[in-house]
Amino acid sequence: MKTKLTYDDGVIEKIAGLAARNVDGVLSLDGGLLSGLTDRFRSESDPTQGIAAEVGEHQVALDMKATVEYGKDIRHIFDEICQRVNRDISQYTGLEVVELNLSINDVMSKREWQAQNSGKPNSNQSTEQVN
């Protein structure tokens, strides 16, 4: 029997987005000003926002854009994102993340970010399980 399992880019983008949003210091994954404008008209959250994936048969390359919290060590945030995204994609799909590029497009205080984003669809996106 011949079988083949493939993943749509959007599936990998969603896994990466949900993993990265749970890293302390990540306020949002976004595409900058244009995404911010379209966000105002969106009624549902989009965990793939700010992420582009290239998915091969065994490997994945990711480009991500993020807004991070002012005062946090951005290098630590990046390392944590890499670890979590790699772990989740590998664990859920068996694919290997061979490249992860993160572009920081803004830094702001948590209070400033919350005031700017309250009520927007992606403002409460999280996957952390509460026990």
Image: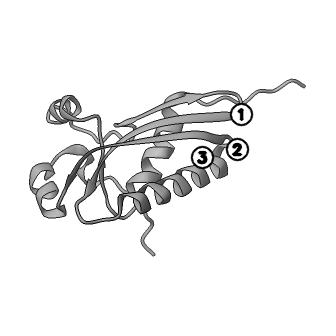
Going from N to C along the chain, the mark reached first, 3 or 1, is 1
Q: Write down the quadrant of residue 25 in the picture.
A: bottom left
Q: Residues within 10 Å of mark 3 (few under 14, many from 20)?
A: many
State the colouring used for the structure image: one colour
> Does dot 2 land on a helix, a strand or a loop?
loop
Q: Where is residue 39 in the image (x, y as percent from the top left)?
A: 20, 35
Gap between marks 3 and 1, in whole Å? Answer: 11 Å
Quickly name the residue at label 1: 58
Gap between marks 2 and 3, in whole Å? Answer: 7 Å
Asked if the residue under mark 3 is in contact with the one under mark 2, i.e. CB atoms within 8 Å, the reply is: no
Q: Residues within 10 Å of mark 1 (few under 14, many from 20)?
A: few
**Horizontal placement of 69 versus 96: left or right?**
left
In this view, the residue in front, 43 or 103, is 103
Image height check: is 105 above or below 111? above
> Does dot 1 land on a helix, a strand or a loop?
loop
Q: Write down the quadrant of residue 87 in the picture.
A: bottom right
Q: Which mark is residue 89?
A: 3
Residue at image position (60%, 29%) is 55
Residue at image position (76%, 27%) is 4
Q: Which mark is residue 94?
A: 2
Image height check: is 24 above or below 124? below
In this view, the residue in front, 46 or 72, is 72
Q: Quadrant of the image for the C terminus? A: bottom left
Q: What residue type is labelled 3?
A: Ile
| Residue 64 can be seen in this image | yes
> Does dot 3 land on a helix, a strand or a loop?
helix
Q: Residue 96 carries which label?
A: none
Q: Position of residue 41 (x, y in %)?
A: 15, 31
Q: What residue type is labelled 2?
A: Gly
**Horizontal placement of 111 versus 61: left or right?**
left
Q: Which amino acid does label 1 sit on?
A: His
